[in-house]
Amino acid sequence: MQETAFRLIGIVLPLGCLLGSVHAQSPFIRGDVDGDGDLTLTDALTVLGSISERSSLPCPDAGDFDDDGAVTLGDYGFLLEHLIGGEPAPSEPRSTPGSDPTEDPLPCAE
Ligand SMILES: [Ca+2]
Ligand SMILES: [Ca+2]
Ligand SMILES: [Ca+2]
């Protein structure tokens, strides 16, 4: 039992150091906050829910629709407009999962 615990620590610790040192970011599609690969009303409602409940999204960077470094009601509005009218287009990455092209404090971890 103890041996198993030590083995686990041996695996988890280096992994944590690795993630902490390179600031690894999971690839994401901008606006696809639930990560199902599509921009839908569920994504908009998830953004709205996280803002009103002050909870964080699994991938806050995906919720930052206009890529200004913060997830706000504006992002919810843009996402809703995009779903209804097709405009405005979200910032990159938008068609295939990718990483954030601009630096900001928003994380994206699975
Ligand atoms: Ca989605
Ligand atoms: Ca934003
Ligand atoms: Ca950014």
Image (spheres, rainbow, N blue to C red):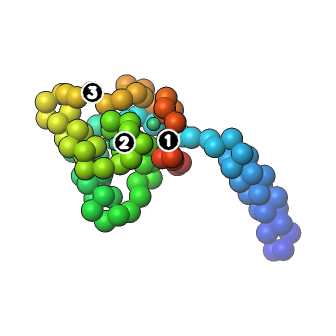
Residue for badge 3? 89
Q: Check residue 60 in the rendering and tell me which mark sits there, or answer none.
A: none
Q: Which amino acid does label 3 sit on?
A: Ala
For label 2, the SS is: loop
Classify mark 1 as within 8 Å of ligand 3 or not, answering yes or no.
yes
Give residue 42's position: percent from left, percent from top.
25, 48
Residue 75 vs residue 6: left or right?
Answer: left
Residue at 78 percent of width and 52 percent of height: 14
Is the C-beta separation of discs 2 and 1 under 8 Å? yes
Q: Between residue 36 and residue 53, name the one nearer to us.
A: 53
Mark 3 touching mark 1, by CB under 8 A?
no
State whether residue 74 appears in this view: yes
Residue 10 is situated, as x and y percent measured from the top left of the image, at 82, 58
* Ligand 1 occupies quarter: top left
First along the sequence among labels 2 and 3:
2
In the visual, does 6 lie left or right of 44?
right
Q: Distance between the residues labelled 2 and 3?
A: 12 Å
Disc 1 marks a residue whose amino acid type is Asp
Disc 2: which residue: 64
Instruction: Name the residue rendered at 38%, 36% in the picture.
Output: 67
